[in-house]
Amino acid sequence: MLSDRIERLTESATIAMAKKARQLKSEGKDIISLSLGEPDFDTPDFIKSAAKEGIDQNYTRYMPVNGYDDLREAISNKFKRDNGLEYSKDQIVVSTGAKQSIANLVMSVVNPGDEVIIPTPFWVSYVDVVKFAEGIPVFVESTIETDFKISAEQLEAAITDKTKLMMFSSPCNPSGSVYSKEELGKIAKVLEKHPNIIAMSDEIYEHIVFEGKHASLAQFDSIKDQVVTVNGVSKAFAMTGWRIGYIGAPTWIASACTKVQGQFTSGTSSVSQRAAIAALNTDPECTSQMREAFHKRRDLVIGLLKEIPGVKVNTPPGAFYLFPDVSHYFGKQHNGKTISGPSDLSEFLLSEAFVAVVSGEAFGDPNCIRFSYAADEKELIKAVSRIKEALTALN
């Protein structure tokens, strides 16, 4: 008999849809998968060379739980260079992907019954990690009309004496929204009044911003000791399979996360850590070609989506996702089956258009679907064309 905690846990919607897409592909179907958040570029050669050097130098043994000393030094320098943040090495913990970083944090600070504020839409794993820790997710809703961002006033209204943590991402997965420095400053003013609340700022997409400049929540000195900055190398350097994430945090939280990690996985892959040092020590502009390609694809796909009647789409300034409102099609039918929401629509598009997207319900928004435009332009054009044709068949 399974434990209650595993029964509370749901399968990641993005992984579940990718699994269905792979299954149909193995059956010979021409599936275009836009469900996973993974750059379609290869890891730069200089990073791969650093990994090979690590093997030749025999970095093949157990490593410190919180990461190699020189990697944490590189992360400390990166925070200073890119974000203007001061984190010492003992305030940094390296994990097996940012997902583990987030799980470590939640398990370290959330007790049963603690409330965790999560603006919608949110990355799929936030809620289940909170539930695993027996915390209570408290959702603060946004809409496409507000570019999927919440206000400081909304945050203030959601805080109670049980609030322990706030979790958000900027640039955001799934919406691509980016909070400006001014907007974060207003959020910081709210957090100042509640020094017992921790704020998790997930900044994994920081180098994929098309307009303006990425801003970190921890830049505000008044709340620096309340903020945990989560980041990694997966998105900026096309290193999803290397599994390297990290946090910058108050020392007491970093120590707690190291303690959790020490019991579950210990230190992350030694070879991946050597590769990450090379990535983080370089100027992030080395990946500007990838960012420019994403920018071009974003504009391409937005233009195509706007040609589909009933689809509402905004222009997100970051990440590589679009999160269109498709509620116009709810209640319509195909072959006697009614589309009751985004999950039905996602299944319909997979079976009829052979395009894999993810239901917005998994991200806390019942009106939208998410798809990644981290794909070849020809594939994107074909995918949107198929979606348009399939939606036209609904009546």
Image (tube, rainbow, N blue to C red):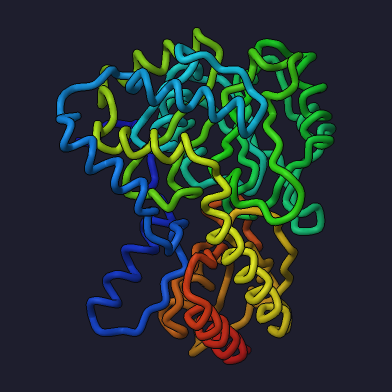
Horizontal side of 93 relative to 275 (left or right) equals right
Instruction: Decide if residue 111 is in sight here.
Output: no
Residue 353 lies, in percent from the top left, at 47, 84
- In the current view of this chain or complex, which residue is farthest to the top? 252
Nearer the observer, 234 or 71: 71
Q: Which residue is located at x 47 percent, y 23 percent? A: 105
Q: Which residue is located at x 64 percent, y 46 percent? A: 171
Q: Quadrant of residue 72?
A: top left
Q: Quadrant of residue 15?
A: bottom left
Residue 144 lies, in percent from the top left, at 75, 58
Residue 150 lies, in percent from the top left, at 76, 42
Residue 130 lies, in percent from the top left, at 48, 31
Q: Which residue is located at x 66 percent, y 11 percent? A: 196
For the C terminus, the image quarter is bottom right
Horizontal side of 376 relative to 222 (left or right) equals left
Instruction: Decide if residue 338 is in sight here.
Output: yes
Nearer the observer, 391 or 282: 282
Q: Which residue is located at x 52 percent, y 53 percent? A: 287
Relative vertical location of residue 60 with respect to residue 123 in this rendering, above or below: above
Relative vertical location of residue 301 with respect to residue 105 in this rendering, above or below: below
Total marks in image: 0
Horizontal side of 257 relative to 380 (left or right) equals left
Q: Quadrant of residue 43?
A: bottom left
For the N terminus, the image quarter is top left
Horizontal side of 385 relative to 61 (left or right) equals right
